[in-house]
Image (cartoon, rainbow, N blue to C red):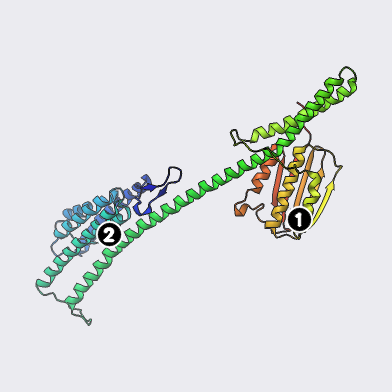
Amino acid sequence: MVIAGSAADVEPRWAEWRRPLPSRAQQRRDWWLGLGTVVGGLATTALVNSIGAQAFSEPPPFGEQLFWNAVVTAPLVVRRRYPLAVLLVVAALFIAAQVRQTGDSVVPSVALFLALHSAGAWERNRVVARWSRIAVIVVMFAWLGFGLVKFLVGPPHAFKDAAGPLDPVLASVLYQLALNLAFFLSAYFLGEQAWVSARRQAELEHQAERLHRSQEQNTRGAIVAERLRIARDLHDVVAHHVSVMGIQAGAARRVLDTDRELARSALLMVEQTARDSVGELRGLLGLLRAGAPNEEKPDGELAALERLPDLVATARSAGLEVEHSTYGEPRPVPDGVALSAYRVAQEALTNVVKHAGARKVDVRVRYLERALEVEVADDGRGGPAFGEAAGGFGLVGMRERIAVHGGSLEARPRRDGGYLVRATLPTAQEES
């Protein structure tokens, strides 16, 4: 197939498309079709001779009739692999069999129809396919004309039961012309339509593949972008931990000889801060792809749970009835966990406003024994969340963010209508 464009984005020139060669399965089916046609031709020849209904008055011996039927139909076993050769061979043998005045002409006519159709549907060179079929049809009509001339100049035929409005001879000529015209035009245009259908199928498959690749690229880009956002969010947290560790270690060093209790307290703070930092870095390094482009340092404040009421107020200003409640005893949680909980609530509320068509939203924060849970439930349509139906990636981003901390995300339609988003984030670090 001729293609144009860069190596990264090639586009076939469909006007010059070449149909791929038949598959092995298609070639096997051709073998069965060809063999079935051969057997059908032999059986038809036997039946025609048994009832004395030969097409010609002086047919050759029965054995020769079987031979001609076999050789006319046998080439069909490779009709899709070598369509042009099959057409020419079948057409030549068909006329040869007619010259010999074989007893049966039905099955050879079927073989000729299939050969014409196959040349139109499978010949890769479209110019050759067109003109070879036209040439065969012209030859066949020339042969038909030769037969009609013999019929007209021969001895008069008796039409005992003729009762129509036309002269019997004229009616016979018109009948033969109309029948053959319908036969050959059907074979020609059905074959052409089969080739056009195959090309359209190839175009659809090509477009589907391009769409699939584009979706994969968009998904990968969105995931990378979300991971980089996670990296930006955690940058300040990790920098804060390291700064605190440095300050506390310096304080411990200065008072180590004079105030051991204060030095001990400072070192405990260093230990806890180091644990928090290592836990966040472990999750980050497990998810962020190596070699991502360098990002500028964040210049804004990190949002945390303390800003959740502001987020609720923003949702209310958009016309939603928002209930905000906290369960359990509030306690300090790692900054990264608080940030991720806030981001989940923010993304969920944003998509409720944009996609859910809801009136009421319930935002709940639960302080569990070893985890922090944030839940957003609405009474909207309950369809796909976070713009997934429109090509969004909110749910993917949430899962990436929650996975950093080893948490879990539940996002599903509610039984009584609406949609539920529940994120659970561990707050207790494992002892190293």
Judging depth in this view, the residue of 364 and 198 nearest the camera is 364
Q: Which residue is mark 1?
A: 315
Relative to 357, residue 153 above or below: below
User: Does residue 234 appear in this view?
Assistant: yes
- Mark 1 residue type: Ala
Q: Which residue is mark 2?
A: 113
Q: Of tags 1 and 2, which is closer to the observer?
A: 1
Judging depth in this view, the residue of 321 and 118 nearest the camera is 321
Q: Toward which corner of the image does residue 104 lie, by quadrant?
A: bottom left
* Image location (x, y in percent) of residue 348: 71, 51
* Image location (x, y in percent) of residue 191: 32, 58
Q: Classify residue 134 as left or right of residue 349.
A: left
Judging depth in this view, the residue of 351 and 107 nearest the camera is 351
Q: Residue at x 61, y 41 (%)?
A: 224
- Mark 2 residue type: Phe
Q: Residue at x 20, y 57 (%)?
A: 94
Q: Earlier in the sequence, mark 1 or mark 2?
A: 2
Q: Toward which corner of the image does residue 268 lie, by quadrant?
A: top right
